[in-house]
Amino acid sequence: MNAPIPTLDVWCELQCPDCRAALTDVQALRERYGDRLDVRLRHFPLEKHKHSFAGAQAAEEAFEQGRGWPYVAAVLGRVAEFERRGEEFLVEVAGELGLDAEEFDTALIDGRHILIVDADQAEGKAIGVTGTPTYVIGGERLDGGTSQEGLRARIEEIADRLLAGQD
């Protein structure tokens, strides 16, 4: 019987400049561990960002269409533009990535992904997430909202320990 793959939950918000900075670490972790570590985007929309719920729903649509992480990277790479243009920008980015932009537009109107976003936010609050980015791995919560310094090394240390325990 195979042991379950360790999971790294990344509590993020697509209007968050700190999440944009954290994306480099997330990408490096995904490259280093590949299929040995399940890196999951978790939504924690912040009330101070007026498009945060739409961004979270759009990210869910991108994952549903099979291009979640490239979409997240594209939106986070242009946080200021997202802040300025809102939902129109989210649909435009989908089209730029070859996703079904019309389906994005419909998903943002019909709210088909809002339950996932609400559940993530509620779970985040329940485990003590107060800002983004926040990481949870091996039962440990690591807050990156204040500083990213040393977090990737700490995540790698925990992931390596979890993976070594599977041998």
Image (cartoon, rainbow, N blue to C red):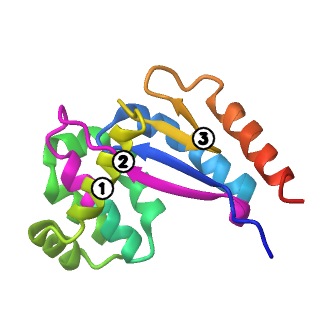
Image position of 158 (left or right of 26): right
Up the image or down, 67 lies above or below 34; here it is below
> Crowding at label 2, few (<14), some or many (≥20) Cα neighbours within 10 Å?
some
Amino acid type indicated by mark 2: Glu
Residue 161 is a magenta residue: no
- In the picture, which quadrant includes the C terminus? bottom right
Contact between marks 1 and 2 (CB within 8 A): the answer is: yes
Circles 3 and 2 in contact, beta carbons < 8 Å = no
Residue at the image position 42 percent from the left and 31 percent from the top:
18
> At 51% across and 57% down in the image, what residue appears?
40
**Amino acid on which disc 3 is placed:** Asp
User: Toward the viewer: 115 or 52?
Assistant: 115
Q: What element carries label 2?
A: helix
Give residue 125's quadrant in the image.
Answer: top left
Secondary structure at numbered mark 3 = helix
Which residue, given by chain and number where applicable, does mark 2 sit on? Answer: 123
